[in-house]
Amino acid sequence: MGITFHQYLEDHGLLLLIAADAGFKPGLIVERDNGGFWPFDDIRYLLKDEKLSFKTRLVEADMPDVISGRKKVGVGGSLEIPFLRITGGLDSARYVNVRIGEVRTRSFREPRLRLWNQLRRLLRESKRRHPDLWDGLKKKHYCVLSTWYASRYTVELGNALPVRLGVRFEREIAVQAGAKVDIDRKAKVISGTGTRRVPFAFHGEQLKI
């Protein structure tokens, strides 16, 4: 049984990442810009407390077997998802189908609502004491409360896959550190294992402090 990306993200209040790295984790402040989310700073920066520490845990997500969705092919036949980037060669289709499974989530050990209420009080106090730190912070900034990871993925290329595949096309595939990839030329499918270090989505709260 499966579910679409859009439905899954909406049901869980998640925001999809165009690109991410291992530093994208709970407690990070991110900025929404150019259709994506980009690291701004750690929440300890705004709280002026470098010793602040919140414990997190990685658990299996409550989800169906497969999450599927369509991904738009970019300029020059490129494709980018958090753990896989194809720099060119997908010229003959506008979209490909992406499926992910075995999703896990990393979040703070403390219940989300209680933790966010606690952080919000601390952030309000920080804003009052250190207004200079808040210059430029707008509603497009979020505090990451949980990150979501795919342990396996499949990209169904269909007609987007070049008829002749060779070393050149394989060189255009960049795999995130810790992830693995396999190309099935006959089925026109790229599949592999993702990584627990690079998320594909996150849940966050806007800094409406």
Image (tube, rainbow, N blue to C red):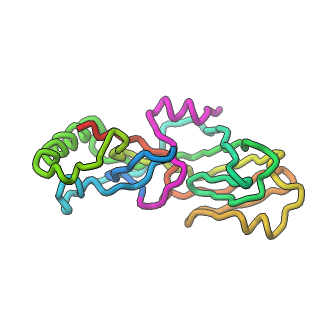
Say whether residue 157 is magenta. Answer: no
Report the side of 116 relative to 79 (left or right): left
Q: Position of residue 197 (x, y in %)?
A: 48, 59
Q: Position of residue 47 (x, y in %)?
A: 19, 53
Say whether residue 19 is magenta. Answer: yes
Pick the front one: 61 or 26: 26
Residue appearing at x 47%, y 40% in the figure:
15
Q: Which of the image's four quarters has the C terminus?
A: top left
Q: How many discs mark residues in the rendered view? A: 0
Report the side of 204 relative to 136 (left or right): right
Q: Position of residue 12 (x, y in %)?
A: 46, 33
Q: Which range of residues does the magenta coloring cover?
A: 1-23
Pick the front one: 94 or 53: 94
Residue appearing at x 38%, y 50% in the figure:
30
Q: Which of the image's four quarters has the N terminus?
A: top right
Q: Position of residue 162 (x, y in %)?
A: 84, 55
Residue appearing at x 32%, y 57% in the figure:
41
Residue appearing at x 79%, y 68% in the figure:
168
158, above or below 184, in the image: above
Report the side of 158 relative to 104 (left or right): right
Answer with the quarter of the image where residue 48 lies. Answer: bottom left
